[in-house]
C-alpha cells in the first residue's frame, strides 16, 4: 500500500495538501460516519438517500478502507482485498448503490485447490462441492446433503456454542482432507477457524455455495470512484486525511467528534473503525457500564494478513491458470497453521486483463493469514529480513505455476500485519474485525450511548465485502429510525405538545 500523499482534502477529497482538511465542514450534521470502509460508505449512502445530512471522515487519503488498491511505477495497479465475494453483493449494490456498480459484478471463471491431499478445479457451488465430496472424497450423497441442510438451517438466533470443528466431526469424522476443503477457503475469506461458532461459518459458507465466487470488473479503484460519485451526488460530504481522535459523549449521548483540534457536531455518530478502538479509545470506557466495557476488553480480535504483490512487466503475459488458487505444501490441514509466520498455505489471486477491461496488464497477489504477535515485536532489520523471506518463499511457490515469474515480474513487494495496522488503524492489523462475541457489543452500542452506532467487520458474519456492506445498511436504517424519533421529540417540544 502506498505512502504517497496525493491530496489533503475535504468535500470531494480534492483540496490541495497543506490546508485544513475540515475547513469546509459544517458545524453539525445529522450523522457523522467515522471511517470509509464498505460498511461506512454504504451506511452514508443509505442515510443520504433517506434525506439525512451526512459527513464521512476518513484518516487515509483513499476512501474504501480495506477495499483498496495502490499503484506502483511501471503501470502496476494492485488490488488488496478484491479476491472474491458471494453473489449477494449484486443485490446489495443494486439496492443501495447503483445499477452501474451492480452490473460490474461478475463471476470468477476459475477456482482451484492444489495441496498434498487433493487438487482440482471447482465452481465453488453446492452442486460442485457435492460432486467432489462424493466422487473425490468418497462421501455418501445423503450425508453431504444432510451437512448442507444442517448449515442452511443454522441462523443468528441459534445457540452459538457448537463449533465448526464439532459440525465437521459429526458429518465427516476424522476426514482432515474434507475439513481442509470446507474450511481453508473460508478462513482466507474471513479468518474463520475450527474453534469459531459453526453458525458464523455456516452463514458465510452457504452464501458462497449458493452461486460461487464473484468479483468487480474494473478493479477496486473503479468501484470506489463510482461509490464516491454516488455519495457526492446524494449530498454526502467526504473528508479524507481526517483522523477522528475522540467521539464526544455528554450526558450519555453522542454529540459529535473531535478531529484536527476541532469539534464537529452530530445527532448520531457511526463508527466504522475497529469495535474495540471505538469503545475503549475513541469513546473511553468510563462512558459505559463497567460490565459492558469489561466484555469489550475480552472480545478477541480476528487474525491479520500478509500479502505479496507481483506486478507483471508491460508486454509480458501470464497464461490462464485460474482466478483463485488455494495452494499449500502442508501434508495435512491444520487450522492455526494458516497463520504461521513461515506458513505453507496461501491463496494466489491472478488478475488478468479482464480485471480491468481495456488494460493489457497482469498482476498476481498472494494472501496468507497472519498473527500480529509474530510481526509486532521484530526490530527493523529482523522485520526487513522476514519480509524478504516472505517474498522469497512466495516466489518459490508461485514458480510452480508460473515458471518464469522471476523474469516477468517488474515489481514485487510485501505487506504484513504492521502494514495493515498502519493503513487502517485496526488494532493488531486485524483483517476481519473481531470474533463472534464482538457482534453483541457492536449491536448493543446505541443502548449504552444514545446516538452512537457501529458498523464494520465484526463477528465474522459482518465481515468481508458483503458482510460489511450489509451491516452498513442495517445500521443506517437504525440511525434513520433514531433520527426520526429525535425529530418527533423536537417537534413535539416546539409545539408544546
Ligand atoms: C488481505 C485481505 C484480503 C481480503 N480479501 C477479501 C475478499 O477477497 N473478499 C471479501 O469479501 N473480503 C475480503 N477482505 C475483508 C474485507 O476487505 C473487509 O472485511 C471489509 O472491506 C471491511 O470493511 P469495513 O467496513 O469493516 O471497514 P474497513 O475496510 O476496515 O475500513 C475502516 C476504515 O476506518 C478508517 N478509520 C479507522 N479509524 C479511524 C479514525 N479514528 N478516524 C478516521 N478514520 C478511521 C480506516 O482508515 C478505514 O478506512 C480482505 C481483507 C484483507 C486484509
Image: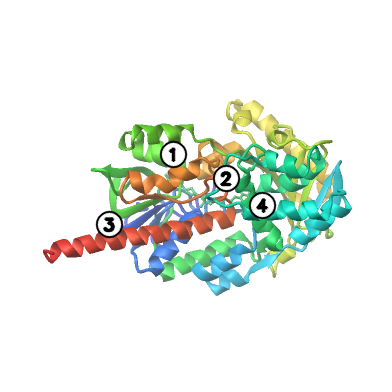
How would you rate the neighbour count of disc 1 (Cα within 10 Å): few for under 14, some for 14-19, many for 20 or more? some
The reply to whether dot 3 and dot 1 touch (C-beta < 8 Å) is: no
- Disc ID at residue 304: none
Residue 296, quarter of the rendered image = top left
Apparent side of residue 456 relative to residue 489 in the rendered image (left or right): right
Labels 1, 4: front one? 4
Above or below residue 410? Residue 125 is: below
Real-space Cα separation, disc 2 to disc 1, in angstroms: 14 Å
Residue at x 75%, y 45% (from the top left corner): 171
How would you rate the neighbour count of disc 2 (Cα within 10 Å): few for under 14, some for 14-19, many for 20 or more? many
Real-space Cα separation, disc 1 to disc 4, in angstroms: 33 Å
The front one of 385 and 139 is 139
Q: Secondary structure at mark 2?
A: loop
Sequence-earlier tag: 3 or 1: 3
Above or below residue 160? Residue 72 is: below
Residue at x 35%, y 36% (from the top left corner): 284
Residue at x 80%, y 37% (from the top left corner): 174
Labels 2, 3: front one? 2
Sequence-earlier tag: 2 or 3: 3
What residue is pinned by disc 2? Answer: 432
Sequence-earlier tag: 2 or 1: 1
How would you rate the neighbour count of disc 3 (Cα within 10 Å): few for under 14, some for 14-19, many for 20 or more? some
What residue is pinned by disc 4? Answer: 151
The front one of 322 and 61 is 322
Disc 1 CB within 8 Å of nearest ligand 1 atom: yes
Residue 188 x, y percent position in the rendering = 68, 46
The reply to whether dot 4 and dot 3 touch (C-beta < 8 Å) is: no
How would you rate the neighbour count of disc 4 (Cα within 10 Å): few for under 14, some for 14-19, many for 20 or more? some
The reply to whether dot 1 and dot 4 touch (C-beta < 8 Å) is: no
- Disc ID at residue 28: 3
What residue is pinned by disc 1? Answer: 277
Amino acid at each position: 500500500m502506498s505512502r504517497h500523499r496525493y491530496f489533503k482534502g475535504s468535500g470531494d477529497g480534492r483540496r490541495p495538501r497543506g490546508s485544513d482538511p475540515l475547513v469546509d465542514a459544517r458545524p453539525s450534521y445529522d450523522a457523522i460516519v467515522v471511517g470509509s470502509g464498505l460498511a461506512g460508505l454504504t451506511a452514508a449512502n443509505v442515510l443520504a438517500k433517506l434525506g439525512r445530512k451526512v459527513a464521512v471522515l476518513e484518516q487515509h487519503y483513499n476512501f474504501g478502507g480495506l477495499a483498496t488498491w495502490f499503484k506502483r511505477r511501471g503501470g502496476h495497479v494492485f488490488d488488496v482485498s478484491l479476491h472474491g465475494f458471494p453473489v449477494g453483493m449484486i443485490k446489495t449494490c443494486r439496492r443501495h448503490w447503483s445499477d452501474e456498480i451492480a452490473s460490474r459484478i461478475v463471476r470468477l471463471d476459475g477456482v482451484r485447490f492444489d495441496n498434498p491431499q487433493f487438487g482440482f478445479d471447482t465452481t465453488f457451488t453446492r452442486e460442485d462441492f457435492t460432486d467432489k465430496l462424493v466422487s473425490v472424497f468418497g462421501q455418501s450423497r445423503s450425508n453431504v446433503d444432510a451437512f448442507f441442510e444442517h448449515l442452511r438451517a443454522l441462523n443468528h438466533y441459534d445457540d452459538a456454542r457448537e463449533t465448526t470443528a464439532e459440525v465437521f466431526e459429526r458429518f465427516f469424522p476424522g476426514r482432515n482432507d474434507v475439513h481442509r476443503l470446507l474450511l481453508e477457503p473460508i478462513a482466507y475469506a474471513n479468518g474463520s477457524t475450527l474453534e469459531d461458532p459453526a453458525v458464523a461459518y455456516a452463514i458465510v459458507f452457504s452464501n458462497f455455495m449458493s452461486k460461487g465466487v464473484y468479483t468487480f470488473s474494473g478493479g477496486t479503484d473503479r468501484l470506489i470512484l463510482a461509490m464516491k460519485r454516488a455519495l457526492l451526488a446524494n449530498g454526502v460530504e467526504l473528508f479524507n486525511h481526517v483522523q477522528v481522535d475522540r467521539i464526544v459523549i455528554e450526558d450519555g449521548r453522542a454529540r459529535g467528534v473531535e478531529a484536527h483540534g476541532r469539534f464537529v457536531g452530530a445527532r448520531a455518530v457511526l463508527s466504522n473503525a475497529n469495535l474495540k478502538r471505538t469503545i475503549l479509545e475513541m469513546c473511553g470506557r468510563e462512558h459505559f457500564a463497567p460490565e459492558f466495557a469489561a466484555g469489550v476488553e475480552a472480545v478477541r480480535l480476528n487474525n491479520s494478513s500478509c500479502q505479496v504483490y507481483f506486478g507483471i512487466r508491460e508486454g509480458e503475459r501470464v497464461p490462464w491458470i485460474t482466478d483463485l488458487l488455494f495452494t499449500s505444501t502442508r501434508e495435512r490441514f491444520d487450522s492455526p497453521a494458516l497463520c504461521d509466520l513461515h506458513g505453507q498455505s496461501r491463496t494466489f489471486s491472478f488478475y488478468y486483463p479482464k480485471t480491468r477491461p481495456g488494460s493489457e496488464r497482469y498482476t498476481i497477489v498472494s494472501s496468507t493469514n497472519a498473527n500480529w504477535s509474530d510481526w509486532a515485536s521484530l526490530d527493523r532489520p529482523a522485520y526487513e529480513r522476514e519480509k524478504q523471506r516472505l517474498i522469497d518463499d512466495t516466489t518459490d511457490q508461485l514458480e510452480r505455476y508460473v515458471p518464469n515469474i522471476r523474469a516477468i515480474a517488474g515489481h514485487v513487494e510485501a505487506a504484513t500485519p504492521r502494514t495493515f495496522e498502519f493503513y487502517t488503524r485496526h488494532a493488531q492489523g486485524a483483517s476481519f474485525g473481531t470474533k463472534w462475541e464482538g457482534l453483541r457489543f457492536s449491536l448493543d452500542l446505541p443502548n449504552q450511548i444514545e446516538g452512537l452506532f457501529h458498523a464494520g467487520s465484526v463477528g465474522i458474519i459482518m465481515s468481508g465485502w458483503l458482510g460489511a456492506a450489509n451491516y452498513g445498511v442495517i445500521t443506517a436504517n437504525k440511525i434513520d429510525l433514531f433520527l426520526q424519533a429525535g425529530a418527533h421529540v423536537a417537534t413535539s417540544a416546539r409545539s408544546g405538545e
